[in-house]
Image (tube, rainbow, N blue to C red):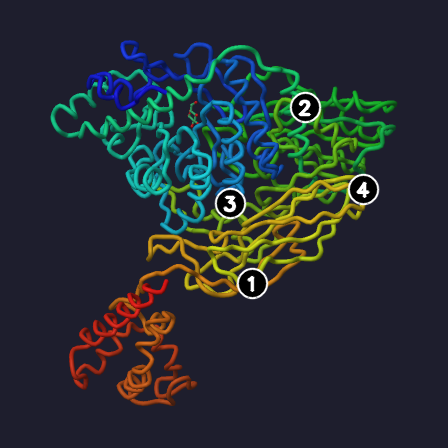
Amino acid sequence: MPDINAIVSAMTLEEKAALVTGASAWTTTPIERLGVPELLMSDGPHGVRRVPDIHAMGAVSLPSTCFPTASALASSWDAGLIYAMGQALAEEALALGVGLLLGPGVNMKRSPLGGRNFEYFSEDPYLAGELAVSLIEGIQSKGVGTSLKHYAVNNQEFERFRIDAKVDERTLREIYLPAFEAAVKRAQPWSVMCSYNKINGSYGSEHYDLLTRILKEEWGLEGYVVSDWGAVHDRVTALKAGLDLEMPGPRARRTQAVVEAVNDGALDESVLDEAARRILRIVFMAAETPKGGAFDVDAHHALAQKIAGECIVLLKNNGILPLKANVNLAVIGRAAEVAHFQGGGSSHINPTRVAVPFAELKALAEDAELTYAMGYPADDSFQPALIEEAVTLAQAADVAVLHIGLPSYKESEGYDRADMDLTAQQIALIKAVSAVQPNCVVVLNNGSPVAMGDWLDGVGAVVEAWMMGQAGGGAIADVLFGRVNPSGKLAETFPARLEETPAYLHWPGDNGQVHYGEGMYIGYRYYDARKLPTQFPFGYGLSYTTFAYSNLELSSHHFRDVDGVVVSLDVTNTGAVAGKEIVQVYVHDRVSVLARPPKELKGFAKVALEPGETRTVSIPLNARAFAFYHPGHGQWVTEDGEFDILVGASSADIRLQAAVTLQSTSALPSLLNRESTVRDWMNDPRGKLVFMPLYEQVAGGMLSALGGGEGLGGDGGAIGMDMTGFIMEMPLLSLLQFRDDELPMPAEAIVDALLAQVAAAGDFAAQFA
Ligand code: BGC
């Protein structure tokens, strides 16, 4: 690695201004004079979309392996496998001359209607963060960079270039940022891509708080911030905010604007130097890894199949699966012949080959007879003849397997979904076929939950195969015939009704704004809090075997936040075949000064077990597992108190639980102020100490001021209210002011004196912290 500072010092203003904008759709600007090479970037995230002409954005890319998309991947909950996929992606990137891959995407699935949800992992920030760390580490372990995207609060496609996402600070910190935070702090992606949208009034590309204060200063990003393609509005404002590299390029006017801004003093040259340094460091890091050669097409296809097998979620099974090798199958549905394995948009891969589900089934079916009917058309027309043909075939077979792929006009990057429904023809097809053939298996290929209420009861089994990558057809056959025991679990809730989804009333916004009115309550946090039934809950998935949970143990029942606690338990395979179970650990805070979701995922493990085998699983929980973000303190805090550790097979199937007591080491200043209510004073440990001696006096005075009554805690009184409750909601200052004439000094002075005592007690306590 050359001396970056020396290079920056040797660069002219014009060269620096040129470097911070791309030279083409996919490359950075080289500087021959100083030996600065170009860096080639390509999409991401589940394959290498290397466009041969670097000036073309949307052209057909060179062949590469299309791995399972993020919705699918996340359902594997398998960090090790995702790391391996990262390594394979990097090998392909290198073979195709690519130095940095644009992914992964860790935006939260706020609504099942998000058109791009298939590119994102989960509705849960912890799970998304863990999986992103693995993918980034896998890719970067081979000397290829990543670009973590889209930072931040890009949760919809509707007006994605301009919508202003209005989200409160705590929700931002607890839901929309943690996956980015974990990935940056632990895996150091070589770059982070800003989002197109605005966040609380500023574009993602111009957001100083997000780009500089949080991402670079607080989390310590060492790489560069790159714009999403076309996300920059004012280049100088973006630079000042911390946006290092604008893509795509070239944009001569932007470069000129930067030069002029430095020359006329509007932009401090040190800001430009810092952006140049960040970009150059990564350009040279990427250059260290030799490019070219070939990747192992067969091995990567096989890996893609193995991963897809781990991603498939068995949603329903009345025992019809796994299929017997000798049953005659009516294979129905266009997706059986034309595999629906990826989504539309920038992540669209030109696959090296495609496993056709029908052919893969045939290869495993041994003596059985297989017939095929298309069942539904590619477009949105309604064609009853196709349904009739399928019904005839299904009647003549032992089992009907329906391959249902959600068409791209209903789901893609660039636009949101209008509903959660399959097409009208697909719904009619499933109903008609299952009416004549109860041995009916539905295999779904989609990137986000679909409604099943119309037909779920009538079918024998449902297999969620997602947008499963190019080798998914083989994985589906493996699962249907029991060569692979399904082990995926949902990384997102399948809602019962769209109208019951968390963001329903706040989606997709209007008048240029979308209000995140549901706050932290997205996904299972919402369904838990509302006690709403779901179609299938977060963390859910069936297997061909069964698992028992026992012997929950904690390394300690009483621990300090900084020490954390280790949760261990035994998992036993109680069925007849080998299988894998995903054990989930959720934390519930019994009492908190700020509202908290009923429970939150804080740990998980995937464990492989032979029939009858038992293994002990240990899952560590650190301080963060118990913490919440307190906007008043502007930081993550823990509180003393009791928590429940809930161990489940899904968010709705808690098998074991135990209570623990946490001792907080957060030494926080008191937040009491002149506006604080009597309740605030009572809830603040130091405030309570200082205020208690005054309480009876003040409260009693209030009673007489209001004309007497039954007294504190009474039921009624002169004006028919419980005075304790009334007083608790009043600011102490207001309460005192009712007795202003009787006070020896102004009410403000009394409150200020109490506040001073609280502060002094805090300073005293801090000496012992
Ligand atoms: C997408 C990014 C992508 C970029 C380059 C944008 O439209 O939002 O995810 O990396 O294009 O293709």
User: Left or right: where does residue 607 sit relative to residue 16?
Assistant: right
Mark 4 or mark 3: which comes first in sequence?
Answer: 3
The kind of residue on which mark 2 rests is Arg
Residue 620, placed above or below residue 447: below
What label sits on residue 45 in the rendered view? none
Residue 218 spot, x, y in % from top left: 34, 43
Q: Nearer the viewer, residue 768 or 58?
A: 768
Marks 4 and 1 close (CB-CB < 8 Å): no
Q: Which residue is mark 1?
A: 660
Mark 4 or mark 1: which comes first in sequence?
Answer: 4
Judge whether residue 686 can be spotted in this image: yes
Closer to the eye: label 3 or 1:
1
Q: Which residue is mark 4?
A: 319
Marks 3 and 2 close (CB-CB < 8 Å): no
The kind of residue on which mark 4 rests is Gly
Q: Secondary structure at mark 3?
A: helix
The kind of residue on which mark 1 rests is Val
Q: Specify the quarter for ligand 1.
A: top left
Q: Secondary structure at mark 1?
A: strand
Residue 255, placed above or below residue 447: above
Q: Which residue is mark 2?
A: 334
Mark 2 or mark 4: which comes first in sequence?
Answer: 4
Closer to the eye: label 2 or 1:
1
Q: Which residue is mark 3?
A: 126
Mark 3 or mark 2: which comes first in sequence?
Answer: 3
Closer to the eye: label 4 or 3:
3
Q: Nearer the viewer, residue 183 or 22?
A: 183
Residue lying at 50% horizontally and 33% vertically, measured from the top left: 115
